[in-house]
Image (cartoon, rainbow, N blue to C red):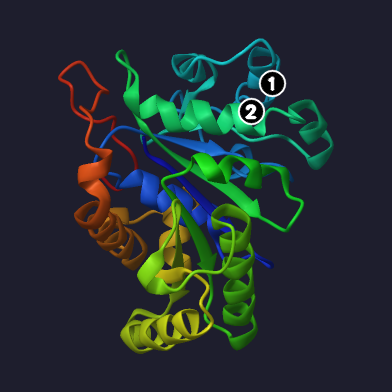
Amino acid sequence: MALIALAADKGSPGVTTAAVALAAVWPRRVLLAETDPAGGDLVYRSAAAHGGPLNPNTGMLSIAATARRGLVPDQLWDHVQPLSGGLEVLVGLGNAEQAAGLAGLWPTLGRAFAQLADSPHAPADVIADCGRISGDTPAVEMFSQAALVLLISRTEPEAIARVRDRAAALSAKLHGGARGAAALGTPLIGVVLITDPSDSAKVVHQVNDMLVASQTGARVVGTVADDPAGADQLAGRKRGRLDKSLLIRSARKVTSDLYQQFGAAWAVPAAGGPDGRPTAGAGR
């Protein structure tokens, strides 16, 4: 199974941009799910494969009725829409009020996402954009099914302090208490920093030292470039060679490192196009 959940503690560190960038360069077929209970962003920033807008009613909103009757992982594909670059997405809720329709269904969704990799018909990993989380955010109920929870953070001191505290709280919730770096529980809690590539190595070292000293059970697993121009290209707001952008190049490095460390545990045959190759996404 390979459900990878992305989230942030506070502010706007770029969870959706990071999720789209990682999904766009994911080495196997992947489904990008907008699971932020506050509502999704892709209907406002991305075009559908047919050139028009995405349908806001097909995605998390439409899956709510299905999930109440039980959810087989392959049923997820009935609610998926392709973006113009080919990336397959489960469009998020329109607003926070609609989250009431998913009350009690988050564990069911988490299991379906995690089990999709084992589908005999259309296996895929799932990258879930969970947005900002707190102790009572319902999307956290999916995390126990995840292979990896990635906390997205910028590098200002207050942001780093918040991601440290959030990692510790998640470790207590998911693992039964704070754990040192030598005794990581499952799912692994990782941190992805949004940073200037020129000083990323120094920042990673400093943040890792702090996470270990605080016994959060988390560690930095990679950095994504703070690249506004690349983010605009990814969202279709600006033209340019997206595959050459700092954003996509850094996202490739993160996915490569993740697969080097965990790929054996996630190894299932990929499926996508008629030739069996993964479905293409932006930047591939």
Local secondary structure at mark 2: helix
Local secondary structure at mark 1: helix
Residue sitting at x 53%, y 73%: 216
Name the amino acid type tagged 1: Ala
Residue 192: % across, % down:
44, 66
Residue 221 appears anywhere in the view: no
Residue sitting at x 57%, y 56%: 7
Name the amino acid type tagged 2: Met
Residue 52, image quadrant: top right
3D distance between C-alphas at marks 2 and 1 = 6 Å
Whether 213 is drawn above or below 170: the answer is below
Please, which residue is most extreme toward the left here? 275
| Other residues around mark 1 within 10 Å, as few (<14) / some (14–19) / many (≥20) | many
Residue 121: % across, % down:
31, 13
State which quarter of the image contains the C terminus: top left
Q: Are marks 2 and 1 in contact (CB under 8 Å)?
A: yes
